[in-house]
Amino acid sequence: MNLIINNHILNFSDPCIMGILNITPDSFFDGGKYNTINKVINHVSNMINDGASIIDVGGESTRPGSEHISVNEELDRVIPVVLELQKRFNTIISVNTSKIEVIKESILAGVDIINSIYPFDKKILKLMANNNLLVCIMHIKGTPKNMQIFPFYSNLILEISEYFDYQIKKYQKYGIKKNRIILDPGFGFGKNLSHNYMLLSQLNIFSKFKLPLLVGMSHKSMISKLTGTTKSLYGSIACAVIAVINGANIIRVHDVAQTAAALKIVKSTLTIKN
Ligand code: 9MG
């Protein structure tokens, strides 16, 4: 499976690494770390050299309990960084945002993927129908402010499958072709610990949609809650490895070098023929 965007090809014969660039003062893991353009460029350059094929830029935290920021604040954080990355690197750039104004400016700045944690509303769908960017449909129950207050499902996997089915049809109705869609079950977005691990163990069920599958578990609380330590690098890598074995195509991570090394082992093991 290949996806073509602008002048890039995303080839899913190998898992792709999406490196996280949080330009937020309050993200749970790396909030406030990349607060100058030099630090950003250095970090992105390292992520690309270490094996990231996509850089996901985010100006608003999506961690549980987080509040929205204003449009202007998000624009001021995201757009100058995207323009600088476009100038310096020949890489696929994704912007994680749900605001139409930020999406519009990101498109003008030349990004390749819009990674929204919410399904697009009609206005955004119409806007996205008029370009060729890739879009991510991520499952979420609630909003970051309330999503972790007793999330409940009578059948988690079925509910997420039905959500994907509904959203894919809606996106197609507005003119977004299926070959522009990426799916993401949304680890930690309205899911408790056992929901998250059930999802990880049954990820391959979503291969029935025949669309690229993105997952993000890097340093999320599903890891520290299980291991009992706040140092969640090894747990994050274990999750990435299991996700790829279970069919994930894009892994959204903070630690690109370590994840790339682990995924090389997975790849060579999965490709051994008897
Ligand atoms: C922005 N963001 C934070 N966590 C994420 C996840 O798991 N998936 C996607 N697509 N975006 C995320």
Image: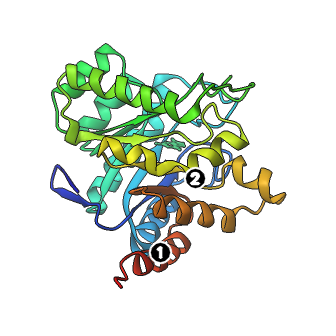
> Dot 1, crowdedness within 10 Å: few (<14), some or many (≥20)?
some
> Dot 2, crowdedness within 10 Å: few (<14), some or many (≥20)?
some
Q: Is residue 142 left or right of residue 86?
A: right
Q: Is residue 260 above or below residue 165?
A: below
Amino acid type of the residue that numbered disc 2 sits on in the rendered structure: Ser
For the N terminus, the image quarter is: bottom left
Residue at x 36% of width, y 78% of height: 271
Residue at x 68% of width, y 33% of height: 64
Residue lying furthest front: 274
Residue at x 53% of width, y 36% of height: 157
Secondary structure state at the residue bearing disc 2: helix
Q: Is residue 67 above or below residue 50?
A: above
- Coloured how? rainbow
**Camera-nearest label, 2 or 1:** 2
Residue at x 58% of width, y 52% of height: 201
Residue 266, numbered label: 1
Residue nearer the viewer, 5 or 57: 5
The residue at which mark 2 appears reads as 201
Secondary structure state at the residue bearing disc 1: helix
Amino acid type of the residue that numbered disc 1 sits on in the rendered structure: Val
Q: Is residue 62 visible?
A: yes
For the C terminus, the image quarter is: bottom left
Counting from the top left corner in percent of width and height, residue 241 is at: 54, 66
